[in-house]
Image (spheres, rainbow, N blue to C red):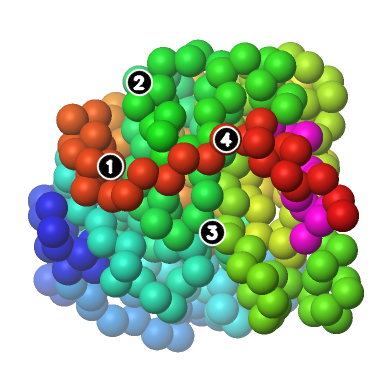
């Protein structure tokens, strides 16, 4: 429990590991069989390859007429051929990383945020085949989480909250009323529609106040401001679909569009982010996405983008998800934080009461 996540030894269970050049050969055969060629007959050229601890890393030059997105559509064919998981990225050339092992099925919570001073809001996503996945929430700064019930969505919210409590003020909208009740002395809790509206109004007033201060100081983001302390604020919404009030959703939308520079982040969780739950323009503000198992490819594409059906094909393992930020997509195993351990962690930290009703009065523009 005291180990840092970067020191975790990931117990990869090896599947078939080829010790010769069979895997690169299988990938090249797949390119041929898929007829992945440009109109002039040219194909992707393998210009670099090396063995890694758990597989291979291949580099391809793509000829004019073959896009990175076109290759990504065939990811499942390459995975079946290589008998492993494949990550595809673009860095002036197609980078194909082939993993011939499997992730652990359970990853205990072990996080010491004070060790990560280079990140403003360090959040542990979990571990991928390439190692620990850490995410600086200020880089997004909003995070969308989705997945069917029972596969790790709420548990990840607990992990995220406990990882960031020492770095930020946390506000939680929990209309189910039970999931986060034990955090009442450490976060602002809204458990009814009226309380959710009051909380979002308070956050919007605080956003306006901060914008005014930064404007007067001539700086463009809170990280550059040298005046009064402006702690980061994270608004967590558990099950976005339960917010029925149009005014509340308007305020959520406004925060996601305007609050990046002032240190206010939104983390929203939902089972299925349809356009009714989260309009397309609002969803676009969530650059970081974490998707646990979903019912089908349509739901996966709703969360991760049109080119990513991967969450529909995740194994039935609790805590397994696809993390996407920018063009990178990674299969990860998130950490498991049982309630008993979560309460024990809180007992070691000083109580940080935050009454948002009081905040709503105190944060009126001057």
Per the image, the residue denoted by label 3 is 137
Q: Residue 355 carries which label?
A: 4
Q: Helix, strand, or loop for circle 4?
A: loop
Q: Position of residue 311 (x, y in %)?
A: 46, 36
Q: Nearer the viewer, mark 4 or mark 1?
A: 4
Q: Position of residue 133 (x, y in %)?
A: 36, 61
Crowd rating for badge 2 (residues with CA inside 10 Å; few <14, some 14–19, many 20+): few
Q: Looking at the image, is mark 1 or mark 3 earlier in the sequence?
A: 3
Crowd rating for badge 4 (residues with CA inside 10 Å; few <14, some 14–19, many 20+): some
Write the start and end of the magenta stretch as one range: 199-210
Q: Distance between the residues labelled 1 and 3?
A: 22 Å
Q: How far apart are marks 3 and 4 (CA)?
A: 24 Å
Q: Is 212 a magenta residue?
A: no
Q: In which quarter of the image is the C terminus?
A: bottom right
Residue 97: quadrant of the picture: bottom left
Q: How far apart are marks 4 and 1 (CA)?
A: 18 Å
Q: Looking at the image, is mark 3 or mark 2 earlier in the sequence?
A: 3
Q: Looking at the image, is mark 4 or mark 2 earlier in the sequence?
A: 2
Q: Distance between the residues labelled 4 and 2?
A: 31 Å
Q: Where is residue 307 in the image (x, y as percent from the top left)?
A: 62, 46
Per the image, the residue denoted by label 2 is 150
């Amino acid at each position: 429990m005291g180990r840092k996540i970067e020191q975790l030894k990931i117990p990869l269970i090896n599947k078939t590991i080829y010790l010769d050049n069979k895997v690169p050969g299988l990938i090249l055969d797949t390119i041929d069989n898929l007829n992945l060629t440009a109109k002039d007959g040219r194909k992707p050229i393998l210009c670099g390859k090396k063995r890694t601890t758990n597989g291979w890393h291949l580099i391809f030059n793509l000829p004019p007429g073959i896009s990175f997105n076109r290759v990504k559509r065939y990811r499942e064919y390459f995975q079946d051929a290589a008998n492993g998981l494949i990550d595809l990225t673009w860095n002036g050339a197609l980078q194909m990383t082939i993993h011939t092992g499997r992730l652990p099925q359970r990853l205990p919570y072990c996080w010491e945020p004070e060790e990560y001073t280079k990140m403003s809001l360090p959040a542990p996503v979990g571990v991928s085949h390439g190692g620990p996945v850490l995410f600086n929430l200020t880089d997004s700064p909003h995070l969308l989480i989705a997945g069917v019930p029972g596969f790790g969505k709420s548990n990840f919210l607990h992990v995220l909250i406990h990882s960031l409590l020492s770095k930020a003020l946390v506000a939680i909208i929990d209309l189910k009323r039970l999931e986060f009740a034990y955090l009442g002395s450490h976060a602002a809790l809204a458990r009814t529609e009226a309380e959710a509206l009051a909380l979002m109004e308070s956050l919007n007033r605080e956003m306006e106040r901060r914008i005014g201060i930064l404007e007067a100081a001539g700086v463009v983001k809170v990280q550059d401001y040298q005046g009064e302390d402006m702690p980061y604020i994270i608004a967590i919404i558990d099950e976005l679909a339960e917010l029925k009030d149009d005014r509340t959703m308007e305020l959520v939308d406004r925060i996601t569009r305007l609050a990046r520079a002032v240190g206010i982040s939104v983390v929203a969780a939902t089972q299925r982010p349809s356009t009714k739950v989260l309009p397309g323009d609002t969803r676009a503000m969530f650059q970081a996405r974490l998707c646990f198992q979903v019912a089908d490819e349509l739901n996966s594409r709703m969360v991760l983008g049109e080119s990513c059906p991967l969450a529909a094909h995740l194994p039935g393992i609790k805590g397994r998800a696809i993390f996407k930020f920018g063009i990178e997509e990674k299969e990860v195993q998130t950490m498991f934080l049982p309630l008993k351990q979560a309460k024990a962690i809180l007992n070691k930290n000083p109580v940080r009461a935050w009454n948002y009703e009081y905040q709503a009065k105190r944060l009126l523009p001057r």
